[in-house]
Protein backbone atom coordinates (compact mmCIF):
# COMPACT_ATOMS: atom_id res chain seq x y z
CA UNK A 1 0.00 0.00 0.00
CA UNK A 2 2.93 2.32 0.80
CA UNK A 3 4.54 1.55 -2.58
CA UNK A 4 1.28 2.41 -4.36
CA UNK A 5 0.95 5.67 -2.44
CA UNK A 6 4.52 6.62 -3.28
CA UNK A 7 3.97 5.77 -6.94
CA UNK A 8 0.83 7.90 -7.10
CA UNK A 9 2.58 10.84 -5.45
CA UNK A 10 5.43 10.64 -7.95
CA UNK A 11 2.97 11.04 -10.83
CA UNK A 12 2.17 14.62 -9.86
CA UNK A 13 5.86 15.56 -9.57
CA UNK A 14 6.93 14.36 -13.01
CA UNK A 15 6.82 15.82 -16.51
CA UNK A 16 7.33 19.48 -15.57
CA UNK A 17 9.75 20.22 -18.42
CA UNK A 18 9.72 22.99 -21.01
CA UNK A 19 7.10 22.91 -23.76
CA UNK A 20 8.18 22.11 -27.30
CA UNK A 21 6.86 24.09 -30.25
CA UNK A 22 4.49 21.21 -31.00
CA UNK A 23 3.13 21.34 -27.46
CA UNK A 24 2.57 25.08 -27.64
CA UNK A 25 0.53 24.61 -30.80
CA UNK A 26 -1.75 22.10 -29.10
CA UNK A 27 -2.64 24.69 -26.48
CA UNK A 28 -3.33 24.34 -22.79
CA UNK A 29 -5.94 22.28 -21.02
CA UNK A 30 -7.33 22.25 -17.49
CA UNK A 31 -8.38 18.83 -16.22
CA UNK A 32 -11.32 18.22 -13.87
CA UNK A 33 -11.79 14.74 -12.41
CA UNK A 34 -15.36 14.12 -11.23
CA UNK A 35 -15.83 11.45 -8.55
CA UNK A 36 -18.43 10.18 -6.09
CA UNK A 37 -18.50 7.86 -3.10
CA UNK A 38 -21.41 5.81 -4.42
CA UNK A 39 -23.64 5.39 -7.42
CA UNK A 40 -26.98 7.14 -7.79
CA UNK A 41 -25.86 10.61 -6.72
CA UNK A 42 -26.03 12.05 -10.26
CA UNK A 43 -22.28 12.27 -10.90
CA UNK A 44 -22.45 11.57 -14.63
CA UNK A 45 -25.38 13.94 -15.08
CA UNK A 46 -23.36 16.65 -13.33
CA UNK A 47 -20.31 15.91 -15.52
CA UNK A 48 -22.33 16.11 -18.73
CA UNK A 49 -24.22 19.29 -17.87
CA UNK A 50 -21.13 21.04 -16.49
CA UNK A 51 -19.28 20.20 -19.71
CA UNK A 52 -22.07 21.69 -21.80
CA UNK A 53 -22.30 24.78 -19.59
CA UNK A 54 -18.56 25.38 -19.91
CA UNK A 55 -18.84 24.97 -23.69
CA UNK A 56 -21.60 27.57 -23.68
CA UNK A 57 -19.14 29.86 -21.88
CA UNK A 58 -16.82 29.60 -24.87
CA UNK A 59 -14.53 26.79 -23.71
CA UNK A 60 -13.57 23.90 -25.97
CA UNK A 61 -14.44 20.88 -23.85
CA UNK A 62 -13.43 17.22 -24.05
CA UNK A 63 -15.54 14.89 -21.89
CA UNK A 64 -13.89 11.54 -21.13
CA UNK A 65 -16.49 8.99 -20.07
CA UNK A 66 -14.17 6.91 -17.87
CA UNK A 67 -16.79 5.01 -15.89
CA UNK A 68 -15.10 1.82 -17.03
CA UNK A 69 -17.51 -0.86 -18.13
CA UNK A 70 -20.51 1.28 -17.13
CA UNK A 71 -20.27 4.28 -19.42
CA UNK A 72 -23.59 6.13 -19.64
CA UNK A 73 -22.86 9.73 -20.59
CA UNK A 74 -23.98 8.66 -24.04
CA UNK A 75 -27.49 7.94 -22.73
CA UNK A 76 -27.83 11.38 -21.17
CA UNK A 77 -26.62 13.09 -24.36
CA UNK A 78 -28.39 10.80 -26.82
CA UNK A 79 -25.12 9.63 -28.36
CA UNK A 80 -24.57 6.12 -29.69
CA UNK A 81 -21.03 4.92 -29.07
CA UNK A 82 -19.89 2.52 -31.75
CA UNK A 83 -16.20 2.65 -30.90
CA UNK A 84 -14.15 3.45 -27.80
CA UNK A 85 -10.48 3.87 -26.84
CA UNK A 86 -9.83 0.16 -26.93
CA UNK A 87 -11.28 -0.14 -30.42
CA UNK A 88 -8.73 2.40 -31.61
CA UNK A 89 -5.86 0.69 -29.84
CA UNK A 90 -6.88 -2.66 -31.31
CA UNK A 91 -7.04 -1.15 -34.80
CA UNK A 92 -10.80 -1.43 -35.19
CA UNK A 93 -11.35 2.34 -35.41
CA UNK A 94 -9.45 5.53 -36.21
CA UNK A 95 -8.81 8.26 -33.63
CA UNK A 96 -11.51 10.36 -35.28
CA UNK A 97 -14.03 7.54 -34.96
CA UNK A 98 -13.71 7.31 -31.16
CA UNK A 99 -14.30 11.03 -30.61
CA UNK A 100 -17.97 11.90 -30.80
CA UNK A 101 -19.71 15.23 -31.24
CA UNK A 102 -21.82 16.11 -28.23
CA UNK A 103 -24.16 19.04 -27.59
CA UNK A 104 -22.89 22.60 -27.91
CA UNK A 105 -19.60 21.47 -29.43
CA UNK A 106 -18.54 19.21 -26.55
CA UNK A 107 -16.31 16.34 -27.73
CA UNK A 108 -16.79 12.95 -26.08
CA UNK A 109 -14.54 9.90 -25.73
CA UNK A 110 -15.75 6.61 -24.27
CA UNK A 111 -13.30 4.56 -22.22
CA UNK A 112 -15.34 1.43 -22.78
CA UNK A 113 -14.99 -1.92 -21.05
CA UNK A 114 -11.82 -2.57 -23.03
CA UNK A 115 -9.94 0.05 -21.03
CA UNK A 116 -9.48 -2.63 -18.38
CA UNK A 117 -7.14 -4.42 -20.74
CA UNK A 118 -4.88 -1.46 -21.54
CA UNK A 119 -2.13 -2.69 -19.21
CA UNK A 120 -1.55 -5.66 -21.49
CA UNK A 121 -0.83 -3.48 -24.52
CA UNK A 122 2.74 -2.65 -25.49
CA UNK A 123 4.13 0.80 -24.80
CA UNK A 124 4.51 1.72 -28.48
CA UNK A 125 0.79 1.15 -29.13
CA UNK A 126 -0.13 3.34 -26.17
CA UNK A 127 2.30 6.04 -27.28
CA UNK A 128 0.74 6.08 -30.75
CA UNK A 129 -2.68 6.70 -29.21
CA UNK A 130 -1.37 9.55 -27.03
CA UNK A 131 0.45 11.15 -29.98
CA UNK A 132 -2.76 11.06 -32.01
CA UNK A 133 -4.68 12.68 -29.15
CA UNK A 134 -2.04 15.41 -28.87
CA UNK A 135 -2.22 16.10 -32.60
CA UNK A 136 -5.93 16.86 -32.26
CA UNK A 137 -5.31 19.55 -29.64
CA UNK A 138 -7.56 22.55 -29.33
CA UNK A 139 -9.15 21.72 -25.96
CA UNK A 140 -9.40 24.21 -23.11
CA UNK A 141 -11.03 21.89 -20.60
CA UNK A 142 -11.05 18.15 -20.02
CA UNK A 143 -13.75 16.66 -17.79
CA UNK A 144 -13.18 13.07 -16.66
CA UNK A 145 -16.29 11.29 -15.43
CA UNK A 146 -15.00 8.48 -13.21
CA UNK A 147 -16.83 5.43 -11.96
CA UNK A 148 -18.50 5.55 -8.55
CA UNK A 149 -16.31 4.75 -5.57
CA UNK A 150 -12.56 4.29 -5.63
CA UNK A 151 -10.60 2.15 -8.07
CA UNK A 152 -7.02 2.15 -9.30
CA UNK A 153 -8.07 4.09 -12.40
CA UNK A 154 -10.00 6.65 -10.37
CA UNK A 155 -7.02 7.21 -8.05
CA UNK A 156 -4.81 7.78 -11.06
CA UNK A 157 -7.23 10.19 -12.72
CA UNK A 158 -7.47 12.07 -9.41
CA UNK A 159 -3.70 12.32 -9.29
CA UNK A 160 -3.07 14.08 -12.57
CA UNK A 161 -6.21 16.24 -12.61
CA UNK A 162 -5.84 19.87 -11.62
CA UNK A 163 -9.14 19.89 -9.78
CA UNK A 164 -11.18 17.08 -8.24
CA UNK A 165 -14.94 17.53 -8.02
CA UNK A 166 -16.69 15.29 -5.49
CA UNK A 167 -20.44 14.86 -6.04
CA UNK A 168 -22.71 13.74 -3.21
CA UNK A 169 -26.31 14.10 -2.02
CA UNK A 170 -27.65 14.92 1.46
CA UNK A 171 -28.46 11.25 2.10
CA UNK A 172 -26.50 9.83 5.08
CA UNK A 173 -25.12 6.92 3.03
CA UNK A 174 -23.93 9.26 0.28
CA UNK A 175 -22.27 11.57 2.82
CA UNK A 176 -20.57 8.62 4.51
CA UNK A 177 -19.25 7.28 1.21
CA UNK A 178 -18.12 10.75 0.12
CA UNK A 179 -16.13 11.03 3.33
CA UNK A 180 -14.50 7.66 2.60
CA UNK A 181 -13.32 9.00 -0.76
CA UNK A 182 -11.86 12.05 0.98
CA UNK A 183 -10.16 9.81 3.51
CA UNK A 184 -8.40 7.85 0.75
CA UNK A 185 -7.39 11.05 -1.05
CA UNK A 186 -5.95 12.32 2.22
CA UNK A 187 -4.21 9.04 3.01
CA UNK A 188 -2.37 9.04 -0.31
CA UNK A 189 -1.84 12.81 -0.14
CA UNK A 190 -3.22 13.12 -3.68
CA UNK A 191 -4.79 16.55 -3.46
CA UNK A 192 -4.72 19.29 -0.79
CA UNK A 193 -8.16 20.56 -1.74
CA UNK A 194 -11.37 19.09 -3.18
CA UNK A 195 -14.39 20.84 -4.68
CA UNK A 196 -17.69 19.54 -3.32
CA UNK A 197 -21.05 19.67 -5.11
CA UNK A 198 -24.14 18.63 -3.15
CA UNK A 199 -26.72 17.35 -5.62
CA UNK A 200 -30.47 16.76 -5.25
CA UNK A 201 -31.01 19.20 -2.37
CA UNK A 202 -34.46 20.26 -1.21
CA UNK A 203 -33.22 23.75 -0.30
CA UNK A 204 -30.09 25.81 0.12
CA UNK A 205 -30.31 25.09 3.83
CA UNK A 206 -30.27 21.33 3.18
CA UNK A 207 -27.28 21.71 0.90
CA UNK A 208 -25.48 23.84 3.46
CA UNK A 209 -26.17 21.30 6.19
CA UNK A 210 -24.77 18.44 4.08
CA UNK A 211 -21.69 20.45 3.16
CA UNK A 212 -21.06 21.43 6.77
CA UNK A 213 -21.23 17.80 7.92
CA UNK A 214 -18.53 16.76 5.50
CA UNK A 215 -16.48 19.91 6.02
CA UNK A 216 -16.47 19.64 9.81
CA UNK A 217 -15.52 15.96 9.82
CA UNK A 218 -12.79 16.45 7.22
CA UNK A 219 -11.38 19.43 9.09
CA UNK A 220 -11.15 17.44 12.32
CA UNK A 221 -9.76 14.19 10.99
CA UNK A 222 -8.27 14.81 7.52
CA UNK A 223 -5.70 17.07 5.88
CA UNK A 224 -7.89 17.66 2.81
CA UNK A 225 -9.56 21.05 2.49
CA UNK A 226 -13.16 21.07 1.24
CA UNK A 227 -14.37 23.85 -1.05
CA UNK A 228 -18.08 24.51 -1.45
CA UNK A 229 -18.69 24.65 -5.21
CA UNK A 230 -22.47 24.83 -4.91
CA UNK A 231 -25.75 22.95 -4.64
CA UNK A 232 -28.07 21.54 -7.27
CA UNK A 233 -31.78 21.39 -6.45
CA UNK A 234 -33.77 18.17 -6.60
CA UNK A 235 -35.57 19.24 -9.76
CA UNK A 236 -38.04 16.86 -11.46
CA UNK A 237 -37.01 18.29 -14.82
CA UNK A 238 -33.59 16.64 -14.46
CA UNK A 239 -35.18 13.19 -14.60
CA UNK A 240 -37.45 14.31 -17.45
CA UNK A 241 -34.40 15.44 -19.40
CA UNK A 242 -32.67 12.10 -18.83
CA UNK A 243 -35.75 10.29 -20.13
CA UNK A 244 -35.66 12.55 -23.18
CA UNK A 245 -31.93 11.83 -23.60
CA UNK A 246 -31.26 15.54 -23.71
CA UNK A 247 -29.25 17.28 -20.95
CA UNK A 248 -31.30 19.44 -18.60
CA UNK A 249 -29.33 22.61 -19.37
CA UNK A 250 -30.62 22.27 -22.94
CA UNK A 251 -34.06 20.77 -22.37
CA UNK A 252 -35.01 23.17 -19.58
CA UNK A 253 -32.76 26.25 -19.73
CA UNK A 254 -34.81 28.04 -17.05
CA UNK A 255 -34.99 25.16 -14.58
CA UNK A 256 -33.68 25.60 -11.05
CA UNK A 257 -31.15 22.80 -11.59
CA UNK A 258 -29.95 24.42 -14.82
CA UNK A 259 -29.31 27.73 -13.06
CA UNK A 260 -27.48 25.89 -10.29
CA UNK A 261 -25.25 24.05 -12.76
CA UNK A 262 -24.44 27.18 -14.74
CA UNK A 263 -23.48 29.02 -11.55
CA UNK A 264 -21.22 26.13 -10.56
CA UNK A 265 -19.58 26.18 -14.01
CA UNK A 266 -18.79 29.88 -13.58
CA UNK A 267 -17.47 29.16 -10.09
CA UNK A 268 -15.09 26.35 -11.03
CA UNK A 269 -13.88 28.15 -14.14
CA UNK A 270 -12.67 31.18 -12.24
CA UNK A 271 -10.52 32.70 -14.98
CA UNK A 272 -7.60 33.69 -12.77
CA UNK A 273 -7.28 30.18 -11.38
CA UNK A 274 -7.84 28.70 -14.82
CA UNK A 275 -4.88 30.54 -16.32
CA UNK A 276 -2.53 29.70 -13.44
CA UNK A 277 -3.45 26.04 -13.18
CA UNK A 278 -3.24 24.34 -16.55
CA UNK A 279 -1.09 21.82 -18.37
CA UNK A 280 -0.39 20.73 -21.91
CA UNK A 281 -2.00 17.75 -23.58
CA UNK A 282 1.54 16.38 -23.79
CA UNK A 283 1.75 16.37 -19.99
CA UNK A 284 -1.64 14.64 -19.91
CA UNK A 285 -0.28 12.05 -22.32
CA UNK A 286 2.81 11.42 -20.23
CA UNK A 287 0.70 10.91 -17.11
CA UNK A 288 -1.72 8.69 -18.99
CA UNK A 289 1.14 6.44 -20.04
CA UNK A 290 2.43 6.35 -16.47
CA UNK A 291 -0.94 5.06 -15.34
CA UNK A 292 -1.49 2.41 -17.98
CA UNK A 293 2.04 1.86 -19.28
CA UNK A 294 4.69 -0.59 -18.22
Image (cartoon, rainbow, N blue to C red):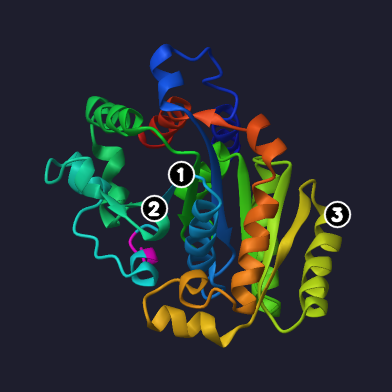
Pair 2/3: label in front: 2
Say whether residue 77 is left or right of residue 185. Answer: left
Earlier in the chain: of badge 1 and badge 2, it is: 1
Tell me the residue at 43%/78% (across/down).
Answer: 242
Residue contact between numbered discs 1 and 2, judged by CB atoms under 8 Å: yes
From the image, tell me which residue sits under label 3.
219
Earlier in the chain: of badge 2 and badge 3, it is: 2
Question: Is residue 151 at least partly visible in the picture?
Answer: no
The residue furthest left is 92
Tell me the residue at 56%/40% (across/down).
Answer: 161
From the image, tell me which residue sits under label 2.
105
Label 2 CA crowd tier, 10 Å (few <14, some 14–19, many 20+) = some
Question: Is residue 194 at least partly visible in the picture?
Answer: yes
Residue contact between numbered discs 2 and 3, judged by CB atoms under 8 Å: no
Q: Main secondary structure of the magenta part?
A: loop
User: CA separation, marks 2 and 3?
Assistant: 39 Å
Label 3 CA crowd tier, 10 Å (few <14, some 14–19, many 20+) = few
Say whether residue 154 is left or right of residue 189. Answer: left
Count of picture labels = 3
User: CA separation, marks 1 and 2?
Assistant: 7 Å
From the image, tell me which residue sits under label 1.
60
Quadrant of the image containing the C terminus: top left
Tell me the residue at 82%/74% (across/down).
Answer: 209
Magenta segment range? 69-73
Q: Position of residue 169 (x, y in %)?
A: 66, 74
Of 61 and 196, which appears nearest the observer? 61
Of 252 and 4, which appears nearest the observer? 252
Helix, strand or loop under label 1? loop
Residue 86, placed above or below residue 246: above
Q: Position of residue 113 (x, y in %)?
A: 28, 57
| Residue 184 shown in magenta | no
Q: Position of residue 147 (x, y in %)?
A: 46, 60
Amino acid sequence: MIDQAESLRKMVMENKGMQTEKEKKTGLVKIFSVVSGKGGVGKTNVSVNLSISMAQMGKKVLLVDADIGMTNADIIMGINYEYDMFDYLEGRASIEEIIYDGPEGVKVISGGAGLLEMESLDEETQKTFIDKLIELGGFDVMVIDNGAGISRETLSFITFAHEVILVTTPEPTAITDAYRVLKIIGFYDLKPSIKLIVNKVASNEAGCEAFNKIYATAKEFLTVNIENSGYIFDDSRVEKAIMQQNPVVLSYPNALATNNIKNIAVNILDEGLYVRNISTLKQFGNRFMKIFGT
